Amino acid sequence: MTDTPLNVPVDKIPRHVAIIMDGNGRWANQRGLPRLAGHKAGTENLRRVIRATVEFGVKYLTIYAFSTENWGRPPEEVHGLLGILQDVIDRELNELNQEGVQLRHIGRLERLSPSLQARVLKAIDLTRNNDRLILNIAWNYGGRDEIVCAIQKIIKDGIAPDDVTDSLVGKYMFTAGAPDPDLVIRTSGELRVSNFLIWQTAYSEWYVTPTFWPDFDREEYRRALEAFAQRDRRYGKVSSELEGSNA
Ligand code: FPP
């Protein structure tokens, strides 16, 4: 069966999609499998979603892979997730590089082992000139932690209070230089932000689906983008259709 083409005009394709890949644990539980099997299936799905992101012409993809709060999970799950990060870099880096994917990391690397930190930095360096897709991996990432980190740096840089503007703060975020997400996708149906990109998503559109992350396929991704293209983004103003009318 051939894939249904994406039916969205180019100017309605989001530049930046951010994803909360939730539901791996429940996906595994439903199958009587350990939680880590869900994370492995989720990682395979991520590969497919990256491919579809390139196909759909989305330029920036940010994925929430490990939060600052995830350290509180059982040690074997934390260990397993760190192992997945290492495996992805070891096994997928060359292919991602050949496909023109630029890897970036958002969050703090400090808590990773020196060898894993070195792998992440090597991956960032190897892919730094790629421009087909910018893939931000949020690992040991927390939105509040990011804001605290930005405030600390702003103070250390001796910035005067009157010079602290919206655009300056953006430059101190881990995502500096990237456009804010246009669309945030959250799988598994939870209606919460979970400390993800709380600064950058001020005006993002949301698409929440009950589908567990390992099952979120190209077809549903296409539907999410088509739903996004129908949204009227007003940024706190009035609709462009209403502007100038007395309605
Ligand atoms: C949320 O599901 C998922 C995570 C906390 C981990 C997501 C990580 C991956 C898919 C691996 C990605 C790997 C790389 C290297 C980018 P959950 O465990 O909270 O699910 P549940 O709510 O059903 O328990």
Image: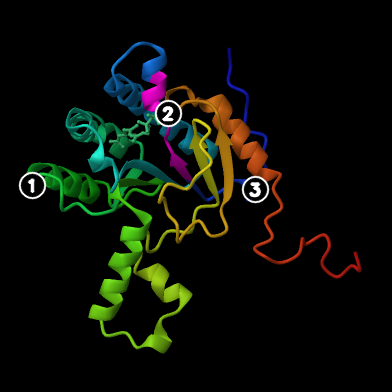
The answer to which of marks 1 and 3 sits earlier in the sequence is 3
Q: Is residue 168 above or below residue 4?
A: below
Q: Residue at x 35, y 88 (%)?
A: 160
Which numbered disc, 2 or 3, marks the residue closer to the eye? Answer: 2
Q: Quadrant of the C terminus?
A: bottom right
Residue at numbered disc 1: 114
Query: Residue 113, how many percent across, how many down?
Result: 10, 44
In the structure shown, which secondary structural element does the residue marked by tag 3 occupy? helix
The answer to whether the residue bearing label 1 lies less than 8 angstroms from the nearest atom of ligand 1 is no
Residue 19 lies within the magenta run: yes
Q: Which residues are magenta?
A: 18-27
The answer to which of marks 2 and 1 sits earlier in the sequence is 2
The answer to which of marks 2 and 3 sits earlier in the sequence is 3
Q: Which mark is residue 169?
A: none
- Position of 107 with respect to 47 (left or right) is left
Viewer-nearest residue: 189 or 3: 189
Mark 2 crowd level (few <14, some 14–19, many ≥20, 10 Å Cα): many
Q: What kind of residue is marked 2?
A: Gly
- Position of 3 with respect to 115 (left or right) is right
Mark 3 crowd level (few <14, some 14–19, many ≥20, 10 Å Cα): few
The answer to whether the residue bearing label 2 lies less than 8 angstroms from the nearest atom of ligand 1 is yes
Q: Residue at x 42, y 35 (%)?
A: 21
In the structure shown, which secondary structural element does the residue marked by tag 2 occupy? loop
Residue 207 lies within the magenta run: no
Query: Residue 98, how many percent across, how many down?
Result: 31, 36
Q: Which mark is residue 12?
A: 3
Viewer-nearest residue: 228 or 6: 228
Q: Quadrant of the N terminus?
A: top right
Residue at numbered disc 2: 23
